[in-house]
Structure formats: C-alpha cells, structure tokens
Image: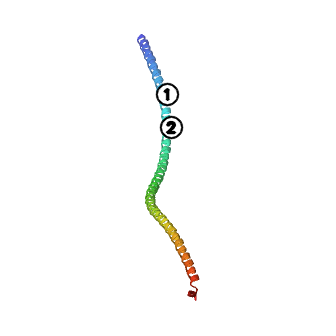
C-alpha cells in the first residue's frame, strides 16, 4: 500500500504538473486568442483603410481625368490664341510694311508737290515781274499814245483841211 500511496502521490504530483501546464497552456491560448482578436481587429481596420484609400484613389483618378480634360481644353484654347496672335502679328507686319510703303510714296509725292509749288512760286514771281514790266510798258505806250494823240491834235489844229 505504501507503494500505492507513493504511486498515488507521484500521480498527484504529475496531475498538478499537468494541471499547471494545462493552466499555462490555457493562459497562452487566451493570450493568443486575444492577439488573434487584436490581429482581426487590426486586419479589419487595415481593410477599412484600404477601402477608404481605394475610394480616395478612384476619386483622385476621376479628378485627374477631369483636370486632364480641362487641360486639353485649355491647351486647345491656348493653341487657338497663339494661332490668332501669330495671324494678327503677320497681318500687322504686312500692314506696317504697306504703311511704310505708303508713307514712302506719300513722301515722294510731297517732295514732287513741294517742287511743283516752288516752281509755281517761281513762275508767279516771274509773272509778277513780267506784269510789272508790262504795266510799265503799258504806261509808257499809253503815254506815247497820249503824246501822239496830243501831237496829232496839234497837227490837226494847224492843218484843218486834213480833217475834211
């Protein structure tokens, strides 16, 4: 019986060891369960963040497409403005060339006109001199005619029969 009591004591001791180990394993299992729950919770939070990031990414892609569309419109508008400005520049340059040509032509015409005016002034001065000379000549001839008429009257007064 002593052997039996010793065996029972040994078994009790092993039972305590097994129970202690069992409690330790249960504690470890609870810890691992808690960690598993925490990992599930973290996984759910990460999944939620990923879903939010996916949604944000989709919104950003939509905004990017919208902005690219606007950019294309602005580029097209800018190209049109550049084309219009280039056309305007070319037109302005042509008009400036035509204006310069017209100005040059007008300058030449003004020079010719000024020369003609100067020639007319000279002609006018010459004609004024000629007029003065003619008036002097007229006055001299008038005087000669008056003198000749007076001479003829005096001759006629001397010779009355010539009148008849």
Residue 84 in the image: above or below residue 16 = below
Task: Please indicate whether residue 96 sits to the left or right of residue 135 in the image.
Answer: left
- Name the image quarter holding residue 93: bottom left
Quarter of the image for the C terminus: give it.
bottom right
x, y percentage for residue 16?
46, 17
Given the current orientation, which residue lies at the most extreme front position?
A: 158
Residue at left offset 44%, top offset 15%: 13
x, y percentage for residue 4?
42, 13
Q: Which residue is mark 2?
A: 48
Using the image as rendered, state which of residue 11 and residue 109 is in the foreground.
109
x, y percentage for residue 132?
52, 67
Q: CA distance from mark 2 to mark 1?
A: 21 Å
x, y percentage for residue 136?
52, 69
Residue at left offset 57%, top offset 79%: 154
Q: Which mark is residue 34?
A: 1
Quarter of the image for the N terminus: give it.
top left
Dot 2 crowding, Cα within 10 Å, few <14, some 14–19, many 20+:
few
Asked which secondary structure carries label 1, the reply is helix
């Amino acid at each position: 019986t002593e052997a039996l009591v010793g065996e029972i004591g040994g078994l009790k001791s092993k039972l305590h060891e097994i129970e202690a180990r069992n409690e330790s394993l249960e504690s470890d299992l609870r810890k691992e369960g808690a960690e598993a729950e925490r990992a599930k919770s973290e996984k759910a939070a990460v999944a939620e963040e990923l879903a939010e990031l996916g949604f944000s990414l989709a919104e950003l892609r939509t905004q990017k497409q919208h902005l690219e569309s606007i950019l294309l419109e602005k580029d097209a508008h800018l190209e049109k403005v550049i084309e219009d400005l280039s056309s305007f520049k070319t037109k302005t340059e042509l008009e400036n060339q035509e204006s310069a040509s017209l100005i040059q032509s007008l300058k030449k015409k003004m020079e010719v006109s000024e020369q003609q005016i100067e020639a007319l002034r000279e002609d006018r001065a010459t004609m004024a001199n000629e007029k003065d000379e003619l008036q002097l000549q007229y006055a001299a001839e008038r005087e000669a005619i008056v003198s000749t008429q007076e001479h003829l009257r005096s001759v006629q007064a001397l010779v009355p029969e010539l009148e008849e």
